[in-house]
Image (cartoon, helix red, strand yellow):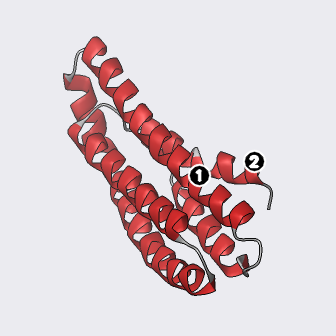
Amino acid sequence: MKSYHFIALAAAPVVCVCVSACSSKAEKTTNAIADLQDDVAEMLLDCENQEDIDKATKKIKKLTTEAEEVCKLAHTDRVAIQEELDQMTRRKSKELQKLLLLKLAKSASKLQDGIFHVQYNLKEVNTTELMQSITDFQGVFSKYKH
């Protein structure tokens, strides 16, 4: 899969949280998603050989399950999130939304750095299963973006 496909998939969490941005629940969701992306990115950046790739693949599969839970919870909390939004001023809402989107963009960018590292610096190792686990991880976020 080409790098630009991974960039598009990494932006999916931004869409997922935009729907619910600007509330304490949205902050928790944003932080959870960003933390998961950061964890995956750090694992990828630490990979140096096939053993590291295999360990990262297993860990990413576990983190995919966590991401699924975070997104399910955010999806079911939509009504509560909207109620919180209604209580905020428009200015405060926009400021918080910018901060949340920036946080997600930074973690998505770090994830892209990790993917780049694996794709271009570790050409001698088999990364097929790893790349599939990354695609699955990122796919969780796009499943709940509506």
Label 1: which secondary element? helix
In the depicted structure, whether residue 14 falls above or below residue 138 = above
Regarding residue 103, the answer to whether it shows in the image is yes
Mark 1 lies on residue:
113
For marks 1 and 2, the one nearer the N-term is 2
Relative placement, left or right, of 85 versus 71 is left
Relative placement, left or right, of 133 versus 5 is left
Label 2: which secondary element? helix
The circle drawn on residue 87 is none
Residue 143: x %, y % from top left: 56, 57
Residue 83: x %, y % from top left: 24, 34
- Distance, label 1 to label 2, CA atoms, is 12 Å
Q: Residues within 10 Å of mark 2 (few under 14, many from 20)?
A: few
Give me the residue at 60% from left, 67% from top.
134
- Judge by depth and name the residue closer to the eye, 55 or 35: 55
Residue 9: x %, y % from top left: 64, 52
- Judge by depth and name the residue closer to the eye, 96 or 6: 6
Mark 2 lies on residue:
4
Name the image quarter holding residue 37: bottom left
Give me the residue at 54% from left, 54% from top.
111
Label 2 is placed on what type of residue?
Tyr
In the depicted structure, whether residue 51 falls above or below residue 107 = below
Label 1 is placed on what type of residue?
Asp
Q: Residues within 10 Å of mark 1 (few under 14, many from 20)?
A: some
**CB of mark 1 within 8 Å of CB of mark 2?**
no
Give me the residue at 58% from left, 74% from top.
48
Give me the residue at 52% from left, 40% from top.
15
